[in-house]
Structures are given as C-alpha cells and as structure tokens.
Amino acid sequence: PFSFNVNRKAVRENVKPGWHYFGRKMDASDFEWVMWFTTFRNHILFALSGHVIFAKICSMVSPKNRSLIYMLYGSLAVLITMGWTYISLILSHCIILYSVALVKRKWLCFVAGVTSLATFKMEPLNTWQEGFVTGSFDLQDVLFYGGCGFSIMRCMSFALENCEKKDGNYSFMDLIKYNFYLPFFFFGPVMTFDRFHEQANNPNLTRKEREMWNITIHALVHLGAILVVDVFFHFLYILTIPSDLKLLKQLSDWSLAGLAYSNLVYDWVKSAVMFGVINTVSRLDHLDPPQPPKCITMLYVFAETHFDRGINDWLCKYVYDYIGENHDAIFKELLATICTFAVTTLWLGPCELVYIWSFFNCFGLNFELIWFSQNVIYIFFQRNLMSEAMSRRIRGLFNAVNFWQIILYNILALNSLDFAQLVAKRLLLKGFPLSTLSVLFVTYCGVQLIKERERRQALLDDPEPVPPPEESKQKAE
C-alpha cells in the first residue's frame, strides 16, 4: 500500500497535508494544478469574476466599445498584480513588433518575433529582463514568463495578420486590445488576431439558442472534473510514484503501462480544465476560443497530438501550413515539421529534455506523414488485393503501436527520462513477448472502437448523398 511508502525520501517532498478528516495526504507534484485550485484559487477566481461582472455591465452600456473595456480592465489587473515596470516591459516588446509589422514582410516579422521570444526563454537575457520586475511573491515567476511568452505569440500573430491586410494597417490600439484581454493574458490559450479582432469588435451580442445552457453545463463538467482530480490526488498519487525508481521497479509491467497512460490522461484533464475555465469566461464575452485538446485516449496519430489547441492552431497557421503549402511534397512536409518543432522547442524553453521530446515527436510525425504518403496498404486496397476489413485491421495494428509511441515520447516531458526509459525497457525488452503483445492487443481493441466511433460520427456529420429519384429509377430499369 502506498500509505506505507508515503514517508520514503523520494516522495516525501511531493506529498503535502491534504484531507485531515480522512487522514489522507495530497499529491502536490504538479505546481500548476496546486497553484490554480489550492494556493492561489481565491486570487484567480476574484480576478476572473471581476472581469465577468465588469465586462458584462460595461458591455450592456456600450457594446461597441467592449474590446476597449476588456483592455482597460486587463491592463489595470496586470498593473496591480505585476507593477508598472512589467507593463512597460510588455509594451516595449509590443512597440518593437508593431514597428516591424508596419514593414509588411512576413519573414522579418517572424524573425523579430522569434528573437523577442528567445529573450524570455534563454539566458542571460531572460534573467536580465526579469530583474526589472520588483516585488516577490510565489506566483511571480509563473505570471512573468507566462504573460511575456503569450504576449510575444500574440504580437507575432498581429504582425503576420497585418501583412495580410491589403488596405492600410491595423492600429497600435488594436494590438493592445488584443494583448491585454485578461482571461488569455497570463495562461492562454492563444487566439489568433484575425479571429479575436472580428469577434471582439462585433456589436451584435445576441446568443444562439441554448448557448447559455451549454456554457453552464460545460462549467459544471469542469467543476466535476476538478473534484475527481482532487480525489485522485488524495488516493492514487499517480504523479509522485514515478519519482521513486526503486518503487517503480517493484511494479508489474501492466502497472507501469497503466501508470504511464494515467500520467498522460491527467495532463490532458489538467489542460482541458484549465483552458475550459478560461474558455467559459471568454464565451460569456461572446468569443469563440480555441477548443480543449483532444482526449489522449482518442489519439493514435501524431498529427492530432497536442495539449494546447491554441498554440497548435497558431503553429499550424503561421509555420506548418505556410511552409508546407498544399502538403503534397515530401521535402516541404519535412521542412515544415522541423520548423514547427523548432519553434515549439523555443516556446517550451530549450533544454536537454525538451530537445529529446522534440526530436522523437518530430521523428514520429515525419514517419507518419511519409507512411501515409506512400501507403502500401491503401494501394493494395485500391487494387482489390486486400479486403476493407483486413485493411482496417492492419491500420489498427499500426495505430496501436503509434499510440504507445505517443505515450512514451510525451512522458519524457511530463515526468522524467528515467521513467520513460524504464517503461520502454519493461514493455519492449523484459516484458516481451507476453506483456508486449497483451498490452498491444488491448490497445488494438481500443483503437478499433475509437475508429468505429469516428466513422459513425463522420457519417452523421456528412451523410452519404442519396441519389436523385430519376437516377434510381433508371438503374432499376
């Protein structure tokens, strides 16, 4: 039982006092979750609630100026929280990138944006800039780098969209309104400038039928997810156990596989809940924010693997789709994926673990793209050398292998290299063939269920066209 191991040196630091009335300690390994829903919960709720109330009142009074009102409240909240030097630092980067945007050269805007982002992600410039922010509190580092990083991404989106504008330029005030929208400022998600500008300046504030009902249901679902995760943190300790390698070596192959899978599921739930809370607030402001990430259980291709759909949409629009163009040339695809992961590496913060994560995920995506472009199974199926059922079974087998590649490549970043190596060694070497094949078989069955669900959903979304009556009659004759 884990209660016996709770005082082990390797896990003692990550287990904190929790539910005293149940005698349970809490897994406090994830700083982000603890910050959002324990330590700074009241501060975050106060800021977001104030935004909702203030924005609603002012939007009713002057709906045409609501984007300006959002900006004023957001700027004031950032000023009170971080101080005037932080605001000045953000504005200086905004001014530089706005000046570059006026040139209307995409490559120059992108180089300037990447350079600006690098100053917050690499030494010694990041430490030098952090020194301008006075004061000291537990959340300062997270808010500093979160606000700066997302601000640069938004400024780059603004600059690149300004290059697309044929008549004139967007104003500097448009950039400030876009950047200082409080719900997105510190923690994202990134909403591209074109979408935000169109929606935030739309004076028509009528809602669709049952929209408020749907918003309420989503808010209740997120509340339920928070409670479920809190229960898991007090009983399962799925984030703390991987830090104790001695304890991990005592677990069975199936337990290790389940632990690795559970860690990715948790990270998806965390992303879905955190972005879901912010998205609920933005939907109350009549915006259509980026959707939560796709559930990890539903993922069996690298092309859909992401935990932040906002950053994913940004990268696809400004890097991957721009370089890959029509995605019909293998060389351009390779270049597009390499450039995409290069920017992602800079966004996450260059370090050895991120390099390894980026390399393996880039390799997996490129291998997948080449496989689909030269798909032997599909060619066999087209030439009637293979039945549809057999084609689907073989693709399902490859997708099952892909699923575990995604898990192994991503627990590198979520946990540690040692944990990922241990799981890979147990499933591929020591556990072969029994554990390896049994885990793959269960995964294969799950993938087939997911593919069948997606097939049925596709038929509902886009049903097969019914032939016109005259054509049917001619065929009958």
Image (cartoon, helix red, strand yellow):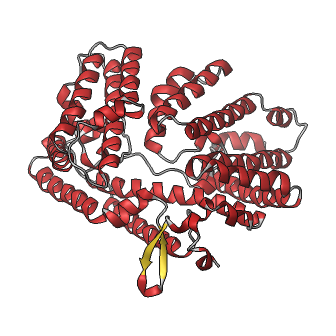
Q: Residue furthest left?
A: 61
Which of the 4 image quarters holds residue 457?
A: bottom right
Left or right, residue 407 beside residue 21: right
The answer to which of 311 and 262 lies nearer the viewer is: 262
Q: Residue at x 84, y 37 (%)?
A: 381
Q: Is residue 196 above or below residue 53?
A: above
Residue 405 seen by the camera: yes
What x and y, as percent, mark residue 120? 36, 33
Residue lying farthest to the bottom in this orientation: 21
For image coordinates 22% across by 27% down, the residue present is 92
Count of marks placed on residues: 0
Q: How far across and down, in percent of the image, does residue 377 sit?
A: 82, 37
Residue 170: quadrant of the picture: top left
In the image, is 438 to the left or to the right of 234? right
Image quadrant for the N terminus? bottom right
Q: Is residue 300 visible?
A: no
Who's the residue at 26% across and 62% down the image? 45
Give residue 132's position: percent from left, percent from top.
Answer: 23, 36
